[in-house]
């Protein structure tokens, strides 16, 4: 457990020095390491939002000057570039049908890059449906960042209105999960809290820095500082609170070099090794899952093309239900073994469709 790893490392540091302040200095070094990772990540996120996405928006806006006929794409209308199979591919806009009959104009929409009919690349999804209007009437939740196979996958920013307090997360996502390094921010009438460090499925893990402030934006020293987290038991331990003169803003990340500090190296390696064991953080997993999703979208698109005139065809209807279920299940895959399993399902789906395609009425 990370608590034990941190405790052992801090004890070792203490034994190797007669200075009673050594442990505090070690914690400060670890907090400085976290700050350096965070600021580097923020620079990369700024490039995605302020440069890459804005460029995509400009290109889409420019393309509107040339008339582009939109077409129905499942529960949305799509305008933008397509591939040779007429699937959304490149840059475009998806305007989704409202899920609320009382508010038919409450349409979610996606602006950004697509590959093989999937939201893949950089894009922004704005949620007008399912907003928590009662608690946050003026908040429009959205996700802006990297995507893969219709899921948040990579670096991004999400505005969250699900809870009583408005929240923002900026950092790593995997398969729609908050997974990896990032920053959670929450505000309410009593103050604010920033949590900077490692997360899995929205919960803190390993270690991180918490910055608590009161309603006057004043730092609460006694509960702000370096924490270690027991993910399984949903508990945490304050390892070292901010000392006078060592607030977050004053941590000297510019003159900090992890390579020179053995203690930091061992803790950082532990964190990376822990994350590497989570298969959804693996880039190969991401690529294989995307390939499977794109292949499935190609088949579902064919099914949708024939649906209107063949929905009562028993074998066709059965196949459509299987593929729709498969699509939802693929979104929730987190292990390599499951990708192999569903690859066989998709391959069998193509064979089944080709087998009775001649029985179907053409649109």
Image (spheres, rainbow, N blue to C red):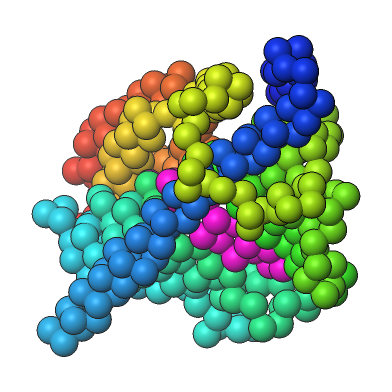
Question: In the rendered structure, does residue 270 fall within the stretch colored magenta?
Answer: no
Give the residue displayed 59% in from the left and 70% down from the top: 141
Q: Indicate the quadrant where residue 83 lies.
A: bottom left
- Using the image as rendered, state which of residue 172 and residue 96 is in the foreground: 172
Whole-percent x, y for residue 171 in the image: 52, 50
Q: Is residue 124 visible?
A: yes
Give the residue displayed 21% in from the left and 74% down from the top: 59
What residue occupies the far front of the structure in this picture?
Answer: 18
Q: Is residue 236 left or right of residue 126?
A: right
Q: Is residue 306 visible?
A: no
Whole-percent x, y for residue 61 in the image: 24, 81
Give the residue displayed 85% in from the left and 49% down from the top: 223
Asked if residue 73 is positioned above or below residue 61 in the image, the reply reads: above
Asked if residue 233 is positioned above or below residue 300 in the image, the reply reads: above
Numbered disc total? 0
Locate the C terminus and report the quarter of the image it occupies. Answer: bottom left
* Extent of the magenta region: 149-171
Q: Is residue 64 left or right of residue 161?
A: left
Locate the N terminus and report the quarter of the image it occupies. Answer: top right
Question: In the rendered structure, does residue 152 fall within the stretch colored magenta?
Answer: yes
Give the residue displayed 40% in from the left and 73% down from the top: 95
Q: Is residue 27 left or right of residue 126?
A: right
- Using the image as rendered, state which of residue 31 and residue 328 is in the foreground: 31
Q: Is residue 106 left or right of residue 165?
A: left
- Using the image as rendered, state which of residue 102 and residue 274 is in the foreground: 274
Q: Indicate the quadrant where residue 50 lies.
A: bottom left
């Amino acid at each position: 457990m990370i608590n034990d790893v941190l405790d052992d490392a801090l004890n070792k540091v203490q034994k190797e020095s007669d200075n009673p302040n050594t442990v505090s200095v070690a914690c400060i070094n670890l907090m400085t390491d976290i700050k350096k990772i965070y600021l580097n990540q923020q620079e990369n996120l700024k490039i995605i939002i302020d440069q890459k996405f804005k460029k995509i928006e400009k290109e889409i806006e420019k393309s509107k000057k040339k008339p582009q006929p939109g077409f129905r794409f499942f529960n949305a209308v799509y305008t933008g570039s397509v591939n040779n199979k007429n699937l959304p591919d490149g840059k475009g806009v998806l305007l989704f049908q409202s899920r609320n009959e009382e508010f038919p104009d409450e349409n979610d929409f996606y602006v950004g890059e697509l590959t093989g009919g999937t939201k893949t690349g950089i894009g922004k999804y704005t949620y007008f449906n399912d907003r928590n209007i009662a608690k946050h009437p003026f908040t429009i939740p959205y996700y802006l960042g990297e995507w893969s196979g219709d899921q948040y996958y990579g670096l991004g920013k999400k505005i969250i209105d699900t809870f009583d307090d408005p929240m923002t997360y900026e950092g790593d996502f995997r398969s729609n999960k908050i997974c990896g390094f990032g920053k959670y921010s929450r505000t309410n009438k009593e103050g604010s809290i920033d949590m900077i460090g490692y997360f899995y499925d929205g919960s803190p893990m390993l270690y991180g820095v918490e910055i608590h402030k009161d309603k006057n934006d004043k730092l609460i020293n006694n509960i702000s500082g370096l924490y270690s987290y027991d993910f399984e038991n949903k508990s945490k331990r304050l390892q070292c609170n901010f000392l006078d003169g060592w607030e977050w803003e004053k941590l000297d990340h510019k003159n900090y070099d992890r390579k020179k500090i053995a203690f930091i190296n061992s803790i950082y390696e532990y964190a990376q090794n822990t994350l590497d064991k989570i298969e959804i953080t693996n880039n190969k997993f991401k690529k294989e899952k995307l390939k499977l999703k794109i292949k499935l979208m190609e088949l579902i698109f064919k099914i949708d093309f024939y649906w209107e005139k063949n929905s009562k065809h028993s074998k066709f209807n059965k196949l459509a239900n299987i593929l729709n279920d498969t699509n939802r299940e693929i979104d929730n895959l987190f292990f390599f073994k499951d990708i192999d399993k569903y690859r066989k399902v998709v391959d069998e789906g193509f064979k089944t469709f080709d087998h009775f395609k001649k029985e179907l009425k053409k649109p």
